[in-house]
Structures are given as structure tokens and as C-alpha cells.
Amino acid sequence: MSNALVKAAADLQGRPDGGMMLTTCETVPGHRIVRVIGLVRGNTIRARHVGKDIMAAFRTLVGGEIVEYTKMMGESREQSLDRMRAEAVARGGNAIVGLRITTSTVMAGAAEILAYGTAVVIEPE
């Protein structure tokens, strides 16, 4: 990560919402977009853990949610969102519109989570 992204990520820590409006919509109600910065993204690739695989195997015998994987994927999503926010802040944005999250298999036992959207500058109407 570049120095600007590292600083931006540090600036976002401790803020309950990551310091920025994120929306899957193309607009933010009550605000107007005054500048479009462009595409921003954040990703992470996670591999399964042997210990979690063993617990997951036991859970498949009795059914139900595999909480070990749910937790791992949730943490991965948040890390991807944090990296995307940091890029937007480093480029001067204060919101991200059109947010999307996707996942793909990179190799057996490893998946990528990618968050992307359009960084913008918004102001109240």
C-alpha cells in the first residue's frame, strides 16, 4: 500500500462508520454529488485454516451455520471495505456510491473478496 493509503487507513480507524458514507445507490438522499473522483476498490484474499476446517467438518455432520467461516468471511469483507474507504479518502472523497462486493475463488481453499464503488465528494443540499 502507498504511504497515502496507509495514512488514510489510519485516519479512518476508530470511526464507527469508517468515516464515510457508503451506499449501493447512485445518489445519497439529502446530499448532492459535487465531484466524481472515480473507481475505488479494496480487496483481500483469505485461505481456509486447518483448525477451522476440522470444526466445520464436525458442523456439517449435525447441520447449521458454520460460524468459523461466517466470522472469517465477515472479517474479510470489513477489511476490503476498509481498504476501499482508505483509497477514497486518499483521493479526496467523502462518500462512495454504487458500492458492490463480489467474491471469487483464487485457488482451492482460498477466496478473494473485492469491494468497489465510485468515490465522490458530497455536500448537504
Image: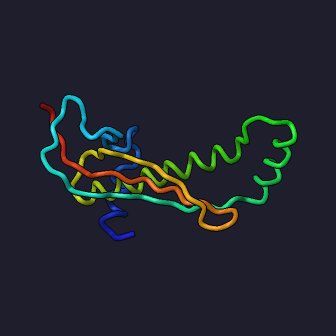
Compared with 30, 49 (above or below) is: below
Q: Quadrant of residue 123?
A: top left
**Image quarter in which the C terminus is found:** top left
- Tally of numbered discs: 0
Counting from the top left corner in percent of width and height, residue 59 is at 82, 42
In the rendered view, does 109 fall on the left or right side of 102?
right
Question: Residue at the location (37% across, 56% down)?
Answer: 9
Counting from the top left corner in percent of width and height, residue 31 is at 18, 34
Question: Residue at the location (63% across, 44% down)?
Answer: 71
Counting from the top left corner in percent of width and height, residue 22 is at 34, 41
**Which of 75 and 25 lies nearest the eye of the viewer?**
25
Compared with 52, 59 (above or below) is: above
In the rendered view, does 25 fall on the left or right side of 112?
left
In the rendered view, does 112 fall on the left or right side of 97?
right
Compared with 90, 95 (above or below) is: above
Counting from the top left corner in percent of width and height, residue 78 is at 49, 48
**Which of 104 and 47 lies nearest the eye of the viewer?**
104
Q: Quadrant of residue 16?
A: top left
Q: Furthest residue to the top? A: 30
**Image quarter in which the N terminus is found:** bottom left
Question: Residue at the location (53% across, 54% down)?
Answer: 103
